[in-house]
Amino acid sequence: MHFFDRAYEGTPLWEIGRPQGEVVALEEAGEIRGRVLDVGCGTGEVALYLAGRGHETWGVDFSARAVEKARAKAGVPGLPLRFEVASALELPALGAEFDTVVDCGLFHTFLDPHRPVYAEGVASVLRPGGRFFLLCFSEEEPLDWGGPRRISQGELRSTFGALLRERWIRPAHFETVGPPVEGRAWLAAFESRRKPGPSARTGRQPHPPRRNRSSR
């Protein structure tokens, strides 16, 4: 069984039962636009939140067990939402483009050879003018508890900078279900180098009723 399928038999450290606060802040600031791809969606909290805010949202994950759990949560009729089992290293195979791509804790799990493949995939599925947001552990996060690789700003720039335009990289907090994780992270924003045309579609949908989390 794949590592992540085993992890989703229980509650992984990164499954906090709600969307990452950094994503909520981005959405409330109007940074997230149009049709959204949540890559490495896990059990779907970010995708569910963004769909509930009116974005047509796709969530994809390599773990079939995670996607199964995500689909079980998506019981609100009318949400513009779909979950698919798919590899983040094969994003062009989705056959779709997005205005925003969100990565909460996926990039820092990749080996070095996977990084350029991932970057090329993200660039290929972003519509002209599309935005990419990435949340990952920074090199300031202590190593004593193990966990995934720590990432520097330089690594983010060297991986994505040739394909996407950097908007900003800033300190952030990656939420987990408990100690000893401090959650020191980077939140990076990049955008497609392709220019949007005058008739570019936003993919924005009217806001459906908010999801009632107390019923879970």
Image (cartoon, rainbow, N blue to C red):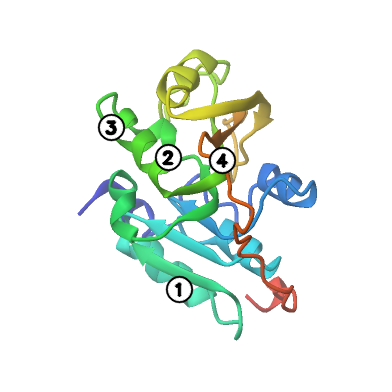
Q: In which quarter of the image is the N terminus?
A: bottom left
Task: Specify which label sits upstream in the sequence, 4 or 3.
Answer: 3
Question: Which dot, 1 or 2, sits closer to the camera?
Answer: 2
Question: Which dot, 1 or 4, sits closer to the camera?
Answer: 4
Question: Which dot, 4 or 2, sits closer to the camera?
Answer: 4
Residue bearing mark 1: 71
Question: Which dot, 4 or 3, sits closer to the camera?
Answer: 4
Distance (Cα) linking label 3 and label 2: 14 Å
Q: Where is residue 136 in the image (x, y as percent from the top left)?
A: 53, 32
Residue bearing mark 2: 123
Task: Specify which label sits upstream in the sequence, 4 or 2.
Answer: 2
Under tag 4, what secondary structure? loop
Q: Quadrant of the C terminus?
A: bottom right
Answer few, some or many: residues within 10 Å of disc 3's Cα (few below 14, many 20 plus, some between 14 and 19). few
Residue 195 tag number: 4
Of the residues shown, which amino acid type is indicated by label 1? Arg
Distance (Cα) linking label 1 and label 2: 27 Å
